[in-house]
Amino acid sequence: MTQKEINNILEELNNGKFHVECPSCYDELNLKEAGLFYLDQFSKEAKLVYKMMLEGQKERRAALKERKANIPKKSEVGAKAVNLGFLLERLAPTLDGFTFNKNDCRSMFDPIDYVIFEGLSDKQKVEKILFVDIKSGNARLSAKQKKIKAAVEEKQVEFKTYKP
């Protein structure tokens, strides 16, 4: 088809005599109001929509590029926070704010950081046994730690001796 033939067809369709029915809502639409065009020979309305779509695409690309650039930073920050948390867990008994006698502490680190036998080193008498987990920042108990906490709170704790 030549460009002249295409233009003639578009002119004929846009003359106001042709109507179509929407297959979804069954509303009737005059083709003159549809803004028909061929390939990249946009109508004025189509040019505006096309420009808006291009701008939206540029904005989405820029946002995606920024998010991709921040992924390593977020991963690095998260890894540093986790590593710092591990260090604090191990150093906690030596820090000033640690309220327990460090000689009463026995480290486990997983799933709970310390079991503390309060009074054992000073009085040679265990007054209380505590399960202590060290948390820094916004860290929370893991699912396993929550189950251990619940078992202790429900007094589901026993002492057993094993003889091989």
Image: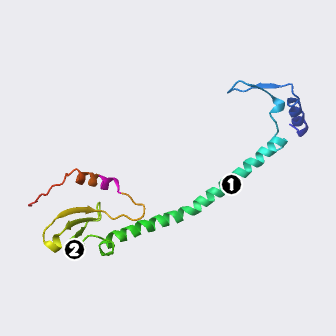
Relative placement, left or right, of 54 versus 97 is right
The location of residue 57, given as percent across then percent down, is 69, 51
User: Judging from the image, what secondary structure is the residue with disc 1 in?
Assistant: helix
* Above or below for 16 versus 51: above
The location of residue 108, given as percent across then percent down, is 26, 65
Relative placement, left or right, of 5 versus 126 is right
Q: Label 2 sits on what residue type?
A: Asn
**Highlighted range, magenta:** 141-146
User: Which residue does the numbered mark 1 point to in the structure image?
Assistant: 59
Q: Magenta includes 142?
A: yes
* Above or below for 56 versus 9: below
Q: Which image quadrant for residue 41? A: top right
* Above or below for 11 versus 90: above
| Quarter of the image that includes the N terminus | top right
Q: Of 47 and 115, which appears nearest the observer? A: 115
Q: Label 1 sits on what residue type?
A: Glu
User: Which residue does the numbered mark 2 point to in the structure image?
Assistant: 103
Other-residue count near label 2 (Cα within 10 Å), few / some / many at <14 / 14–19 / ≥20: some
Instruction: Tell me which colouring the rendered structure shows.
Output: rainbow
Query: What mark, if any, has residue 47 been given in the picture?
Result: none
Q: Of 82 and 57, which appears nearest the observer? A: 82
The span from disc 1 to disc 2 (Cα, nearest Å) is 59 Å
